[in-house]
Structures are given as structure tokens and as C-alpha cells.
Image (cartoon, coloured by chain):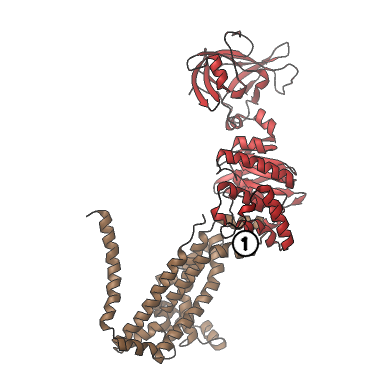
Chain colours: A brown, B red
Amino acid sequence: MTFKRISIACSFATFGLYGILVLSLFYFFRGDTLLETLLSERTLFSVRLSVVAATISTLISILIALPSAFALSRYDFPGKTAVDTILELPMIVSPAALGAMLLIFFNNPLGLWIQDHGAQFVFTFYGIVLAQFVTICGVSTRLIKAAMDEIPVRYEAVARTLGASPGKAFLTITLPLSRRGILAAAVLSWAKALGEFGATITIAGSMAMKTETLPIAIFMRLSSAEIEGTVVLILVLVSIGLSILYVVRFLSRGASYA
Amino acid sequence: MLEVTGLSARAGSFVLDDASLTVLPSSCHVILGPTGSGKTLLLESVIGLRKPEGGKIILDGQDITDLQIERRGLSYVPQDLALFPHMTVRENILYPVRIRGSKHDAENGIVRELVDSLGIGHLLDRSVRNLSGGERQRTALARAVASGCNYLILDEPLSALHESLKKELWYLLKDLQRRYDLALLMVTHDLEEAFFLGDTVTVILEGRVRQQGEKADVYEHPASVDVAKFLGIRNLFNVRTERTADGFLWGYCDDLRATFRLLRPELKLARNETSSFVVGIRPEDVAILDPETSEPCGTNIIEGTVRNTYENGSFLTLIASSNTSSTFVEAVLPRTMAKKLGVSRGSSVLLRLPEESFFLIDSNSPQTSSTARLP
């Protein structure tokens, strides 16, 4: 067997692994359960809660990631390596550990003060948003930085010699040129936030009709052996995920500026 | 007037040291040097893209050394032009106008005048991604001029173009300079481009300014051996000079085993009358004489044998060595004349090195060991 055939066979094997996992869901698929589960108040609450929380956490994350990514992409400053490295934290620390870190933080004097004088995060909607934000902020920054790295600095330099201030050069040159990358980062972050489970359940708990996001709903139904309902919720999550990946692929089709 | 004084800058381990130059209003100053000599580093320091380690940049009497890029009043065209790819030609040209908040009337006036002079009116609504090389250059120049700056900084903007288009743009750049009363500071490694476009020239080698002045002066009198070599002159010979009683300065070249009369008696030489120099002569200044009508033992005439010939369009470059040494002399002559004189590989020739065409380089200048050997 040639090397080419072996490598193609490996790629199909990977596809087959995930394909079998998705297809196996249909063994427990029941048509009547589909509508019943989808239209149930609890499912609709979970979907709504997940979508709203993921949207808010993504917006906050992108707002913070944009200037941070620009700074990391364009400037040299003391501590840049440390900042750049810490962005990987959500990728190397398990989500449950991230959630536990949040929980521990809110039991420290500063965290307690925030909870007393600001918003309550533990076992609340804000906790869900915070858990998702902590999970995706590093990823959003990393993805947007990668998009900005693709844009030659010369464009901004020329814009500035033509009279643009650094802020105007960012708004008129860097931002429009990296818009596809930023959109792709937002969509991927949103999808990651939507599927976030470990950190969310650790800080927000798993209270039905209160902090029950879609992944937590899947966990709770599985815990109570409602396999058919679990399958429907998994299919909803998989459908959203695949649609998102398609959108990201579409957005990533762009010209190189180098 | 743009004055750069004692500018030093660093890029990694490369150091640009003590560079000074002056760009007069409405003139073109060319920074000439090979790749990696520090030309772009100098330019980027002037624009403000790099912070210099020392020196001053004065524009029309104002110290702009520490001024922000957008407040310097210098418009920049980089080597790759950096046309904004998400904009049309019109949007690119109007960028500097709009960024300063000008009104539509001003926009229309500027666009009309510029596109007329650059011949790009039909391209205005095209994306810059779909332009040819020449169209891209014209758009970049239009955008730079639209900024209203009187000083344009050009970093090898024509280097990617083929010869005919490049020459067309030389004329265009000259016209643009006259029409808009622009001062240009331009970087290039192309000798022909430098001496066509430049009024004054700075030669920069290995991070140091080696020579600067009027272009004719730099062209005719390279100040050092390495400048002469960079300018493409291979006829460089070590000579011992002596002034005779009649006032003439003579140079004895050991390598060619020949004696040349170098300077007319009325010209004064600052150094001692018996000194060591390097003399150089451009290959196009070396005359090939007809052996049938010329005396082989005249002043500044040497007998040689053609070792190799190279055709170059309508010219022929020949490499000849003196019959008494292996040192070679390079000459360029029209092919028709070469044919008439029967010049070919192996043939004997009489080479005349006219005294008025020699330039002298002080032996104390850098890298004076110069004599070329037969390749």
C-alpha cells in the first residue's frame, strides 16, 4: 500500500470514528420523543439559556479580545510572553478545574466582596456567563491575534503616513481587513461557549429551570437514564455545532494579504 | 527642506551609523545601495516607523525626530505599495482626504486632477486586487500625492516592474514631481533608475554613508573603491603617481606595466606629488583604436589581447588584457564598431584610456586593494 493510500485511509478512519458515534445515536432515536423533547418547556428553557449566555459571554469576550489581540500582534511590551502564555490556560486546564478555580476565587475575601457589593455569580445565570467567558476569552484572543498577524503592518504604517491616527488606522484598516477572522473567532467562541459544561456546572450547579444549559440538560437526562431525550438534545447540539463549523469554513475563505 | 543629521538606527544586529542627507524642495534625492546596506532602515527611521538611536530629522525647520508618523508631513510608498485591499482605487486615492475629514467637493477636485495626470480614470471603481503592476504603481502614487504632503518617501516602488513599464513610470514620476512641486526621497539599488531620477545621490554601503552629492559628481568621481565597485566599475588600478617638471601627473601601474598621464597640469592635487592612488575608468570611456591608423606607443595607449567578448544588445563588452600582464581592462563599444575594427576573441587591440576620463581614489579610502584580475 502506498503512503498516499495509507494517509487517506487514516483520514477516513478518523471520519469514521466520529461518524459512527453520531450514527449510533439513531439506535435510540424515537420520532415521537423528538417533538416531545424539543417542545418541552425544560428543553426550550435550556436552549434559550444556553444561547443567551453564550451570546453575552461571546460579546464580552470579543470586546476584550480585540484590543488585547491587537496589542499582542503589533506591540512589544514587558510581560508580553506571560500574557501570551496565559491565553493557553483554558486549553491546558480542564474546564472543571477552571470552574473550581472560579468557585475558590469567590470564596476568597476579594471574591466575597464582589459577591456582596456587585453581582452574585455562584449558582446563578451570571455564573454561567462568567464560566463560559473564562473558557473562551483566551481562545478568542488567540484566534483574533492569528487573523491580525496575517495583515502586514505596512498597511497601518502607510495609513498613518497618509494622516490616520493609530486609532483611525485600526478602525479603517486593521478591523475591516481582519473582519472575517474576527467573525470566525466569534462564531467558534460562541459554539465553544454553547457546549461548555465543566466550568459551568462547577460554579453554577445543575438546577433545573435555573442553571440548566443544554450540556447540563444532557448530563441530567443521562443521569436519570432518559436515553431517548438525551439523544435528541445531543442531536440539537451536534446540529448547531456542524452548522457553526460550516459558517466558520465559509468565513475563513479569504485572500492572503501578505 | 528635509535634513537628516547623524542618524543612527538598529535593526537586530544591523546598525545604521551616522547617516546624514539633505532633500531640497522640489528635488529628488536617491539613496543608492545594495540589498542589506541599510537603505530601508534609514527610510523607515525618517518616516517614524523605527525610533532612531541618535540624530535629528528636520523638516522645513521643524524638528520631527520624535513626532508621531501622521504629523510628520511625509507620505510613504513602500516597496509592495500597500494598497488597501478592501478598498477600490477611488477609495484608496481618497483615503488621505477622507481621513482628514475633507468635503466632497475637495474629493472630486483631487480625484479628477490626479487621475487625469496618471491616466487611471477608467480604474476608479475597480478593486485594487484586480490591477496590473503599472496600474497599482499609479494608484499608489496618486494616493501619496493626494495626501497633500510635499515630501514623498519612496522605497523601491518600481522594483517589481519589467523594464519598459519601469521606464514609463520614471517619466511619469518626473512629470508628477514637476506638476505638484514634490520633493522625493527615494531608495533604490538600480543604478540607471538612481541616475535618471535623482538630482542628488547618497551611496550607502554596510550601514554607512560612503558618498553623497550631485548625481554627476557621484557618477564621475566615486569617492572610494567600494563605491566605484558598487557603481559597476571594474577598471580599477593601483598606481604610483609622480608629477613631472612640465606639471603633468603621471601614474605608473605595476599590474598593467603601463604609465598613464592622469591629469592636466592646471589641475591641482591635494596630496603629495609622489603618492599611491587607485585610478578608475568606466568601460564605456575606454576607446578601442584602429591598429592600422593608430600608433601603438602613444600616451595612455596600451596593446592588449581580447580575452572574451559579451554581446549586450547593440553593444559589445570586451575583456582585454595587456600584452605584458594578466590584469584585464573592460571596454564597451557599439557592435557595429567592433565589427568594423575586427574585434573578436583572441584578436589584438589598442586600448586608449583618456586622461580626462580617469578618476582618482585616495589609497587611504576603504578597500583600496582593487586591481582586477582576469576572470
Q: Quadrant of residue B302?
A: top right
The crowd level at tag 1 (other Cα within 10 Å; few <14, some 14-19, many 20+) is many
In the displayed structure image, the side of residue B97 where residue B123 appears, left or right: left
In the displayed structure image, the side of residue A99 where residue B128 appears, left or right: right
Seen at 58% across and 53% down, the residue is: B82
Q: Position of residue B260 (x, y in %)?
A: 63, 15
Considering the numbered disc 1 on the image, is that residue within a helix, a strand or a loop? helix
Extreme residue in the front direction: B122
Q: Nearer the viewer, residue B300 or B361?
A: B300
In the picture, the quarter occupied by the N terminus of chain A is bottom left
Q: Circle 1 sits on which residue? A: A169
Extreme residue in the right direction: B61
Extreme residue in the left direction: A1
Q: Position of residue B295 (x, y in %)?
A: 61, 8
Seen at 63% across and 57% down, the residue is: B90
Up the image or down, B168 lies above or below A247; here it is: above
Q: Position of residue A50 (x, y in %)?
A: 44, 83
What amino acid type is highlighted by mark number 1?
Answer: Ala
Q: Nearer the viewer, residue B31 or B293?
A: B293
Seen at 47% across and 15% down, the residue is: B346
Residue B221 visible in the displayed image = no
